[in-house]
Image: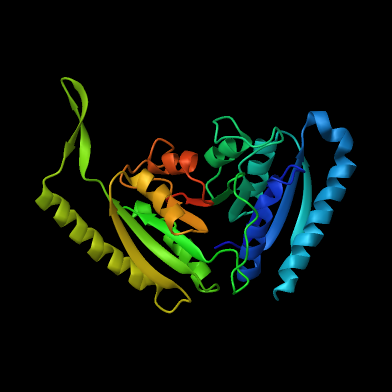
Amino acid sequence: MFKRILVPLDGSELGELALPYAGELAGALSSEVALIFVCDTARCQYRHEHQVYVEKIAQQVGGHIEERGPKTTVTPVVLDGHPAAAIIDYAEKNDISLIVMATHGRSGIMSWAMGSVADKILYGVNMPVLLVRASVPTPSRDKEGQILSRILVPLDGSDAGEAALPYVRELTEKLKLEVILFQVIAPGQHVHSVGGLSYFLFPEQQVESMKASAEQYLEGVSGRFAGTKATVRSEMRLGDPAAEIIKFAGETDACLVAMATHGHSGVKRWTFGSVTHKVLHSGNTPLLLVREPEVKV
């Protein structure tokens, strides 16, 4: 599924935080890698310097991958234009399977603010995107020599919420990973009332029934990893979904949170007003976002 990986670079060390993740995935899955630097109008006079920089990084990434065994193609690319637009255009025309990028720009560490290059790319592409937080230190390798060792997969029981599962399963066919299937049961819901928006708790019997259904569902999903290198376990929590996902990712030292861009809402686009939006803006763990495939009618 990750046949071709694209990594946008801007010449900064923070931008290079995405490289270890891209290298690990490329090495495990024999993926091709394209390292992209975009010259905007103000910096086109330095095109040669940018080309030298990207070529140097390409050699380093290729060398690191070869140290672990497999050999893959790492291509340095320098484009002209607006960064987000040029990256999106290249990704679409070159059948890119995954974009791996840090969450900042040349101005330094940025919040997940609307209007950034990262946001524009997220809104503009259909392929999965792996986002590496600028605040995350350089990842260390485990005893297997891997950066990725534990992946948290939040689910909500819907088909749409399972969009990331095939990608996680592919990784577990090549890498020894612990996969944590995670579902959060909301104890109540917000309801519009005369006084405004009120929160009502579900009856205890209803909550217990929801928990039993979730347990059965997670057990079924766990079976999909049979025959892989994964160690799978299921966890369930009661509370606010986004808050519990962020909290649990920290508690378990998850290396990656892999989730769909929406669940029960059924919206056929990147839904940033959802649980995903909250995890995106408030979490600290690298995040793999996979959009639900559009259903053709």
Task: Left or right? Give the position of 143 relative to 185.
Answer: right
Q: Position of residue 192 (x, y in %)?
A: 20, 27
Which of the two residues, 232 or 158, is positioned nearer the viewer here?
A: 232
Give the farthest residue toward the front: 251
Residue at 31% from the left image edge and 52% from the top image edge: 156
Residue at 64% from the left image edge and 37% from the top image edge: 109
Against 141, is 228 above or below? below
Residue 72 in view in this figure? no
The quarter of the rendered structure image containing the N terminus is bottom right
Residue at 65% from the left image edge and 55% from the top image edge: 138
Q: Quadrant of residue 202?
A: top left
Residue 99 in view in this figure? yes
Task: Left or right? Give the position of 288 relative to 181.
Answer: right
Q: Position of residue 188 (x, y in %)?
A: 20, 41
Give the farthest residue toward the top: 195
Which of the two residues, 294 or 74, is positioned nearer the viewer here?
A: 74
Task: Left or right? Give the position of 47 relative to 225.
Answer: right
Against 233, is 246 above or below? above
Task: Left or right? Give the position of 285 relative to 195.
Answer: right
Q: Position of residue 185 (x, y in %)?
A: 26, 50
Against 163, is 69 above or below? below
Q: Position of residue 90 (x, y in %)?
A: 68, 46
